[in-house]
């Protein structure tokens, strides 16, 4: 079976809160000066990434998933399960929440809700995020929303480069201005806005809010997840498992020379190069890696090795 990794051309999205860091720091050919999202590994219909190399060049990741499921270990389900983004928040994103699978399937008729997690690539000094709320019950939350008591309702957390946040479905959240974030999430584009600072959208009108849905799907009370990082240290590489949950795992790989051979314990791998450059070795074949690359390592790969100096976020479905 072919072991060629699928290097992807991202889908880029203009957002009212976006900026130019996706071009300035990653070299992407952004469509506007307000480009907010790079969908680096995506088979979602709202922004499928295009395969750049190998026998599937020119096809989308969704095409490969539909017609060559053996590349993905014949993973169950009609839809590719994960989506990797890089987000440039020049200004604040709306305060929002995402449903779980059950609610999304029943109410939105889509396959997935949206559990996600964030790795802070870079941020301005004193940057923050909205992460959770202070209400103890749905009734308390609804009352605070109706009375617009945003300052007391929303929990704000300072962030710095290298921080990691798990954002399961039902978590009230917002990425705030100055943050550059890699997001690993379920392949979903279902978002409920609960507050958008009364700002106009690109058409000059206030953007839609989804107050009732937000109240229905939010978690009460908010509880910060208890995360435990698992670190494997080699002479020239460090692997930090940031998250292992029921849907996916996410790790930070830091290579400073080379890794030892890495043996398959995944159905398939999603890789995003955050910084540096190097070489991905698979059997007798080698592939250049550089900052901003996104790729899928197929199920046929039993062993791989990375040479160079590079930081990557690596994930896989469970």
Image (tube, helix red, strand yellow):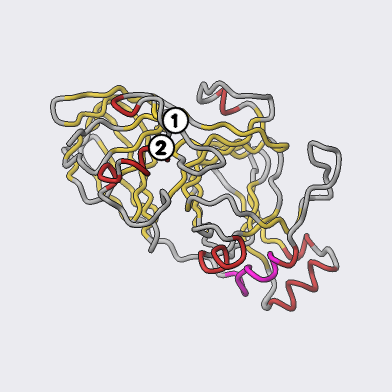
Q: Which mark is residue 310?
A: none
Question: For the point 71% across and 50% down, which residue is it?
Answer: 94
Occupied quadrant, residue 24: top right
Please state which of residues 215 and 137 is positioned toward the viewer in this rendering.
215
Label at residue 61: 2
The CA span between labels 2 and 1 is 6 Å
Locate the C terminus by quadrant.
bottom left
Q: What residue is shown at x 76% (from left), y 65% (from top)?
A: 152
What x and y, as percent, mark residue 136? 67, 77
Say whether residue 56 is visible: yes
Q: In the image, which residues are magenta? A: 213-222
Residue 139 or residue 225, whichever sits in front: 139
Please tell me whether residue 58 is drawn above or below residue 193 in the rendered image. above
Residue 175 location, x and y as percent?
Answer: 63, 47
Circles 2 and 1 in contact, beta carbons < 8 Å: yes
Element class at badge 1: strand
- Percent of width and height locating residue 27: 51, 21
Does the magenta portion include 221?
A: yes
Q: Which residue is mark 1?
A: 50
What kind of element bears circle 2?
helix
Question: Is 103 placed above or below 290 here?
Answer: below
**Horizontal arrangement in the rendering, residue 272 relative to residue 75 (left or right):** right
């Amino acid at each position: 079976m072919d072991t060629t990794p699928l290097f992807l051309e991202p889908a880029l999205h203009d957002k009212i809160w976006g900026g130019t860091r996706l071009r300035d720091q990653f070299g992407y050919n952004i469509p506007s000066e307000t480009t907010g999202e790079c969908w680096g590994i995506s088979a979602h219909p709202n922004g499928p990434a295009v395969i750049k190399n190998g026998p599937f060049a020119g096809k989308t990741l969704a095409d490969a998933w539909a017609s060559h499921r053996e590349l993905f270990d014949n993973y169950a389900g009609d839809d590719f399960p994960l989506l990797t983004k890089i987000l440039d928040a020049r200004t604040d994103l709306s305060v929002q929440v995402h449903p779980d699978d059950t609610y999304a399937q029943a109410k939105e008729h889509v396959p997935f809700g949206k559990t996600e997690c964030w790795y802070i690539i870079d941020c301005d000094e004193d940057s923050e995020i909205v992460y959770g709320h202070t209400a103890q019950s749905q009734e308390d939350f609804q009352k605070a929303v109706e009375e617009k008591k945003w300052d007391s309702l929303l929990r704000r957390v300072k962030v710095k480069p290298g921080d990691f946040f798990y954002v399961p479905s039902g978590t009230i959240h917002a990425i705030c201005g100055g943050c550059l974030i890699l997001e690993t999430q379920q392949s979903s584009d279902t978002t409920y806005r609960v507050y958008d600072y009364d700002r106009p959208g690109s058409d000059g009108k206030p953007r839609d809010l989804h107050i009732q849905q937000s109240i229905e799907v939010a978690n009460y009370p908010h509880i910060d997840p208890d995360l435990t990082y698992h670190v494997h240290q080699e002479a020239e590489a460090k692997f930090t498992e940031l998250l292992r949950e029921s849907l996916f795992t996410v790790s930070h790989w830091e290579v400073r020379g080379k890794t030892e051979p890495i043996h398959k314990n995944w159905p398939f791998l999603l890789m995003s190069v955050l910084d540096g450059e190097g070489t991905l070795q698979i059997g007798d074949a080698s592939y250049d890696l550089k900052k901003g690359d996104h790729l899928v390592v197929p199920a046929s790969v039993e062993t791989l090795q990375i040479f160079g100096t590079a930081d990557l976020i690596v994930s896989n479905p469970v």
